[in-house]
Image: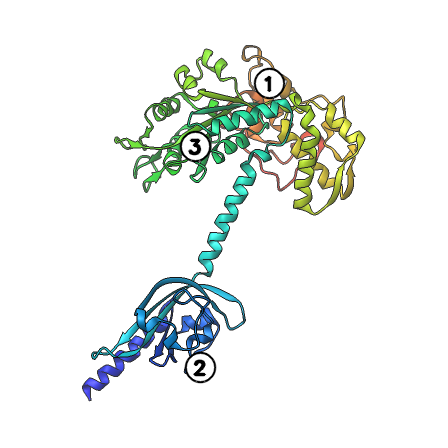
């Protein structure tokens, strides 16, 4: 009696364990009838145990069992002859009529006399995995669309030269320096080089060198070991290691401080890095693409940028022309951005009227393609359908006599003639560009780190005071970030 009681408890425990499994489990007797059906099978198939016990597994309608459709008779399915099925991807038919992707395994069970007792089968639901794989594939397609050469809109000789340079750079492994004014599309060029290269299946890691203070930038690029600095509670890979086998895009490389320039030079020369707080070197297999809106050659002569690093990154330079040098592309770019906004907003806007196009053609576009995109987005806010009119465009396009903020004119002055920065002047510049500190730093010819330090030193807040008007007399949007 004691042995029987013990065996009964073991059976109960086994049943509980099977019911607790995330995988679907069911068993068949030697005639192929279902004898056990756990709760996960109920969830995966939609059939309750009471609906399937005593029936054959034909009820599940597996689309592939041992390379063929599920047969009517268990003796015809081949499981007894083969003895096992391991990790077979197939689909079962849910009770509600749709297919569920699963991974199926099966084992024939025999008694001590080697007689067949039945079959145990496990079913793993692959729905989430397949959805994730589909998202990865779709993301890869979107990346190709975003970074394909076709996304570099324009057929002017200047843009055709850029596309030719991209093809040449993509076919090699050399370090590339992408040069151009802010808003010309330097990141798109870097992406096109990577996604048309042999490294396309590996990561493209982007680092904005002007967005972080020096100490954080070093950790971001090179990683750190536990305890390397206050707050480093665990070791962390840097961007160079994360990009293993792929490409690192160093945007605004002209903002790097001298110590970081020295470390980057070591990466370029020896293809190895040292994490912060660590003495050993780690090899990295990466390609580097750098970009800047600065005149790096001029920065070298002023002692702000290392000459040896300059020649290391300028192995293959690619210059992206400003929009004013390729006005023949304006119509194509306008159509492109209208199509993008039409897809995003659903508004039935067909194009721009003649007066609006004339205003856009005459505009100098100091913000380049990014400014054009923002102008179209501005028009879509005001216009519901039909053609865009001049009244839908930003003020600087509507008024030919509009004088840009003084900071834009100052940006054309050499550093020696540039007025000394004062708190009042900085407040003027911040107000002129809507407190976008990235834009203010570009206009002032400062790195963002230097701008933040100046603001902190003089007690200037990071967001505009509530009583300070926004540029051009407009109202401040609560959704607009203070920086960009």
Q: In which quarter of the image is residue 14?
A: bottom left
Q: Distance between the residues labelled 2 and 1?
A: 79 Å
Discs 3/1, front: 3
Q: Of the numbered discs in the image, which one, if any, rests on residue 411?
A: 1
Residue topped by disc 3? 248
Quarter where residue 411 is shown: top right
Q: From the viewer's perspective, is residue 454 above or below residue 380?
A: above
| Residue designated by label 2 | 50
Neighbour class for label 1 at 10 Å: few (<14), some, many (≥20)? some
Tell me residue 354's x, y (percent): 80, 31
Q: Earlier in the sequence, mark 2 or mark 1?
A: 2
Q: Earlier in the sequence, mark 2 or mark 3?
A: 2
What is the spatial separation of the Cα atoms under label 2 and label 3, in whole angstroms? 58 Å
Q: In this view, does 81 lie to the left or right of 328?
A: left
Identify the residue at image location x=76%, y=44%: 384
Tell me if residue 307 comes above or below residue 442 in the rendering. above
Q: Percent from the top left, x then y, of residue 439?
A: 58, 28
**Left or right of residue 400, residue 311 in this image:** left
The answer to whether 407 appears left or right of 111 in the picture is right
The quarter of the rendered structure image containing the N terminus is: bottom left
Residue closer to the observer: 41 or 452: 41
In the image, taking residue 274 as reference, residue 209 lies left or right, namely: right
Looking at this view, is 460 or 355 the one in front? Answer: 355
Image location of residue 363, percent across then percent down: 71, 24
Look at the numbered discs 2 and 3 and tell me whether their residues touch, using CB distance below 8 Å.
no
Disc 2: CA contacts within 10 A as few (<14), some (14-19) or many (>=20):
few
Residue 58 visible somewhere in the drawing:
yes
- Secondary structure, mark 2, is helix
On the image, the x and y values in percent for residue 18 come to 34, 72
Residue at the image point whose x is 64% and y is 17% from the top: 409
- Of the numbered discs 3 and 1, the one sitting upstream in the chain is 3
């Amino acid at each position: 009696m004691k042995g029987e009681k013990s065996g009964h408890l073991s059976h109960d425990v086994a049943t509980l364990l099977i019911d607790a499994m995330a995988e679907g489990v069911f068993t068949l007797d030697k005639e192929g009838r279902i004898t056990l059906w756990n709760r996960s099978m109920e969830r995966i198939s939609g059939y309750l145990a009471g609906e399937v016990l005593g029936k054959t597994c034909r009820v599940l309608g597996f689309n592939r069992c041992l390379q063929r459709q599920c047969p009517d008779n268990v003796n015809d399915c081949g499981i007894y002859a083969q003895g096992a099925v391991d990790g077979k991807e197939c689909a079962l038919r849910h009770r509600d009529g749709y297919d569920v992707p699963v991974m199926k395994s099966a084992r024939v069970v025999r008694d001590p006399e080697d007689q067949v007792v039945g079959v145990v089968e496990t079913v793993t639901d692959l729905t989430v995995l397949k959805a994730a794989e589909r998202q990865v594939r779709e993301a890869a397609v979107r990346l190709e669309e975003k970074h394909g050469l076709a996304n570099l809109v324009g057929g002017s000789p200047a843009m055709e030269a850029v596309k030719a340079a991209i093809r040449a750079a993509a076919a090699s492994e050399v370090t590339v320096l992408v040069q151009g004014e802010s808003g010309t599309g330097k990141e798109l060029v870097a992406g096109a080089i990577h996604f048309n290269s042999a490294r396309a299946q590996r990561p493209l890691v982007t680092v904005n060198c002007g967005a972080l203070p020096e100490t954080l930038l070093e950790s971001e690029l090179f990683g750190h070991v536990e305890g390397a600095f206050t707050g480093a509670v665990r070791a962390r890979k840097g961007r160079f290691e994360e990009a293993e086998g792929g490409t690192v895009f160093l945007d605004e490389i002209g903002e790097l401080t001298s110590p970081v320039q020295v470390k980057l030079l070591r990466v370029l020369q020896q293809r190895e890095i040292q994490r912060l707080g660590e003495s050993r070197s780690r090899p990295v297999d990466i390609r580097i693409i750098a970009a800047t809106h600065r005149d790096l050659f001029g920065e070298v002569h002023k002692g702000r940028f290392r000459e040896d690093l300059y020649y290391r990154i300028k192995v293959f330079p690619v210059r992206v022309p400003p929009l004013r040098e390729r006005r023949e592309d304006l119509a194509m770019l306008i159509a492109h951005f209208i199509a993008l906004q039409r897809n995003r907003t659903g508004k039935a806007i067909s194009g721009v009227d003649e007066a609006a196009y004339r205003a856009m053609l005459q505009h100098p576009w100091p913000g380049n393609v990014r400014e054009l995109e923002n102008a179209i987005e501005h028009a879509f806010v005001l216009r519901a359908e039909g053609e865009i009119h001049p009244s839908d465009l930003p003020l600087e396009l509507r008024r030919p006599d509009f004088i840009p903020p003084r900071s834009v004119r100052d940006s054309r002055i050499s550093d020696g003639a540039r007025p000394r920065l004062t708190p009042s002047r900085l407040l003027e510049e911040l107000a002129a560009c809507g407190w976008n500190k990235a834009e203010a730093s570009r206009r002032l010819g400062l790195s963002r780190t230097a701008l933040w330090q100046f603001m902190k030193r003089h007690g200037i807040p990071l967001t505009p005071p509530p009583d300070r008007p926004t540029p051009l007399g407009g109202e401040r949007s609560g959704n607009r970030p203070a920086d960009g």
